[in-house]
Amino acid sequence: MGSLQLTSLSSSFSFNFNYITNSHKALKPCKPLGFSRGKIRAISTTRPDSESEATESEEPPSVDFAFVSSVLLPDGTPDVHLRTACGGQKLRNIMLDSNMELYGPYSRPLLNCAGGGTCGTCIVEVVKGKELLNPRTDKEKEKLKRKPKNWRLACQTTVGKPDSRGLVVVQQLPDWKGHEWSYEDVDLPSGSL
């Protein structure tokens, strides 16, 4: 898929401020602000439909994510955010890069270990896609020994390899979850995520 890149040929602004230093003088009307009008030039455009269909099959491997928030939407449905990332990364980095809520009330500095695996505040529940994740580390086994088997520390969890493909469904902040929801597989047409 191509992209449209816009470049401004001129981005200079000329401001004209009329400062009055003597408070006894009457105020004079200022000249209006003057902005130079620049032209915008298109560098590239998208390809025709026939070419884009051919390149979709050549897309690099990626892992699709469905992040389910711990809070319901006003209509009572789960708040689900869909994201895509390359495999071989820590789940913590993927969530932070995608602006997903990870730490909840522990997101301030000094309230979490920033990915060291010592605080246990980045707990997530993996609902689907456990086969794409690395086995639990020793730090995870220690911190999560009284938690369900599908709970993981995002900072210790590596999602697949760089050539991995698949879907991972993650429940954010499972300790703070105030609702129950179920997951069911539905066959989607290719390219719908």
Image (spheres, helix red, strand yellow):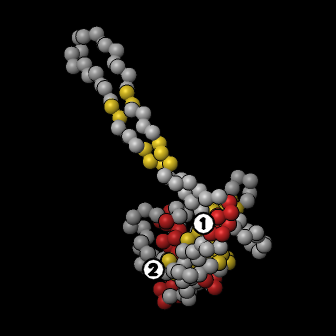
Locate residue 32, reporting x and y percent: 38, 22
* Left or right relative to 49: residue 141: left
Q: Quadrant of residue 130?
A: bottom right
In the rendered image, the quadrant that contains the N terminus is bottom right
Q: Which mark is residue 124?
A: none
- The correct choice, above or below, for 138 with respect to 22 in the image is below
Locate residue 122, reporting x and y percent: 51, 73
Q: Which residue is mark 1?
A: 83
Amino acid residing under circle 2: Gly
Secondary structure, mark 2, is loop
Q: Which residue is mark 2?
A: 117
Amino acid residing under circle 1: Arg
What residue sits 78% from the left and 73% below the top? 187
What residue sits 60% from the left and 72% below the top? 59
Task: Name the N-terminal-most of marks 2 and 1.
Answer: 1
Relative to the observer, which residue lies in front, 164 or 158?
164
Q: Quadrant of residue 116?
A: bottom left
